[in-house]
Image: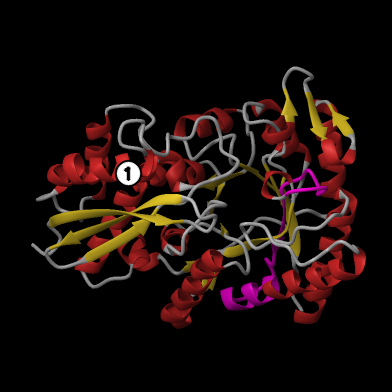
């Protein structure tokens, strides 16, 4: 059979921060798949362990000596069996023995090899003939928090969402223009601005939080008017990164402001109302399900999204579902380890009215798989930057998918107005 696994090959490559990571090839009798693993900077505490003791080199050795012999002879078509085998080989709940990134790279490379064995594109193989919906690109325009240095806003990301676009290429055109417009404004606004960018290609500037909101709002409105469709924006607060548990306060260091949980809630609600925010990610610390629920209840027509809160974990998502904590979830496959685990979380989210937002990591490679996963699993939004090289790899792949689908392609439905 053409999908029988013949070999696995692992190697060390580098991500866009120059950090070592793992890449895996899966070779079948009639196909080939390759995937590289990303790395996040702000990570939820319940994510799987990236690598075993000894790092990338140890992971590669485990692929060569332990995993490849176990997977050889199995059928790549049976993704769940492959992923369950990875769990069995590892034997822990958090992939600490073989590494979550090792499992991730093997799992995605296997899916691509299976698709390739049947001469199909990955999104077709995973999603079937009904996979024809393109996500809206959620693109980081201004970086702060842990994604930047110096006197920058404490909020980590300011994100454009051109949800009025009628095609993916129109949406990406809007995001690129918004990004450029913001760069032009920052040159005039800050004398110290030198065109610096973060890992994700977003601008880094010595501006206040209020300035960042005003710049985003103006750029989105202007570009939306020029292109004749609505462009809104949102934020990734990454609140866990500046929550001080001893003080029980969110400490906005560069702004010189401290807010308790109630004040944080009121502040965020005021931002949603003032700027008509379409999206708010990780507005509270990663275990504060109750505050997520309260914001979700009060912030109308806004996606309240959990990343560190859920870490692509079905159990944590189910805890949120019980009290309506959030209405959207970030999907980062390497947070949970395998494609099967991530698909289970997506299914749980969608059956309970949560939008799944397929996402990159801040330290990424030019691997394009999440473009296909977003289409295969009908994710209405993909979070993957705007201009930086590893982001362009995903965005251009989505343009290719849209072109391939032709008249069958359509944009996703988003419940924000």
Q: Is residue 122 visible?
A: yes
Residue visible at 75% across and 17% down? 246
Closest to the observer, 169 or 73: 73
- Quadrant of residue 239 within the rendered picture: top right
- Circle 1 is placed at which residue position? 57
Query: Residue 39: x, y in percent?
Result: 49, 47
Query: Please, what secondary structure does the residue beneath circle 1 have?
Result: helix
Left or right of residue 311, residue 188 in this image: right
Q: Quadrant of the C terminus?
A: bottom right
Closest to the observer, 156 or 383: 156
Q: Which residues are magenta?
A: 149-175
Left or right of residue 18, residue 373 in this image: left
Left or right of residue 341, residue 193 in this image: right
Residue visible at 83% across and 73% down? 184
- Quadrant of residue 286 within the rendered picture: top right
Residue visible at 88% across and 59% down? 214
**In magenta stretch: residue 158:** yes
Residue visible at 73% across and 33% down? 242
Query: Residue 151: x, y in percent?
Result: 83, 48
Q: Is residue 278 visible?
A: no
Query: Residue 200: x, y in percent?
Result: 62, 59
Decide: is 349 above or below 264: below
Query: Residue 263: x, y in percent?
Result: 86, 30
- Quadrant of residue 169 within the rendered picture: bottom right
């Amino acid at each position: 059979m053409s999908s029988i696994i013949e070999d696995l090959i692992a190697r060390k490559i580098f991500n866009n921060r120059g950090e070592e990571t793992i890449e895996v090839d899966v070779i079948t009798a009639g196909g080939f798949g390759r995937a590289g693993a990303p790395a996040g900077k702000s990570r939820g505490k319940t994510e799987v362990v990236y690598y075993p003791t000894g790092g990338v080199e140890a992971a590669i050795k485990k692929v060569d000596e332990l995993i490849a012999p176990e997977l050889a002879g199995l059928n790549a078509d049976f993704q769940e069996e492959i992923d369950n085998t990875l769990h069995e080989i590892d034997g822990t709940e958090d992939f600490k023995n073989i590494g979550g990134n090792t499992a991730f790279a093997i799992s995605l490379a296997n899916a691509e090899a299976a698709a390739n064995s049947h001469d199909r594109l990955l999104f077709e193989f995973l999603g079937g003939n009904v996979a024809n919906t393109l996500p809206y690109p959620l693109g980081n325009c201004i970086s702060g928090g842990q994604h930047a240095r110096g006197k920058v806003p404490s909020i980590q990301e300011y994100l454009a969402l051109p949800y009025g676009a009628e095609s993916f290429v129109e949406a990406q055109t809007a995001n690129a223009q918004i990004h450029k417009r913001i760069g032009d404004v920052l040159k005039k606004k800050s004398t110290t601005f030198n065109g610096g960018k973060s890992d994700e290609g977003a601008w880094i500037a010595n501006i206040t939080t209020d300035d960042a909101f005003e710049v985003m709002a103006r750029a989105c409105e202007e570009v939306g008017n020029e292109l004749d469709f609505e462009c809104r924006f949102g934020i990734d607060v990454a609140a866990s990164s500046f929550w001080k548990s001893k003080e029980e306060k969110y400490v906005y260091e560069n702004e010189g402001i401290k807010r308790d949980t109630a004040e944080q809630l009121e502040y965020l609600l005021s931002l949603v109302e003032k700027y008509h925010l379409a999206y708010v990610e990780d507005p509270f610390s990663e275990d504060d399900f109750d505050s997520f629920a309260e914001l979700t209840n009060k912030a109308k027509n806004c996606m309240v999204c959990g990343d560190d809160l859920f870490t692509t974990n079905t159990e944590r998502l189910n805890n949120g579902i019980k009290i309506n904590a959030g209405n959207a979830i970030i999907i980062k496959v390497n947070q949970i380890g395998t494609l099967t685990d991530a698909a289970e979380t997506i299914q749980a989210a969608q059956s309970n009215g949560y939008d799944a937002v397929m996402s990159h990591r801040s330290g990424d490679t030019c691997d394009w798989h999440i473009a296909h996963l977003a289409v295969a699993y009908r994710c209405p939004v993909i979070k993957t930057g705007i201009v930086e090289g590893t982001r362009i790899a995903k965005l251009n792949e989505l343009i290719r998918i849209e072109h391939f689908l032709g008249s069958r392609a359509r944009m996703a439905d988003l419940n924000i107005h």
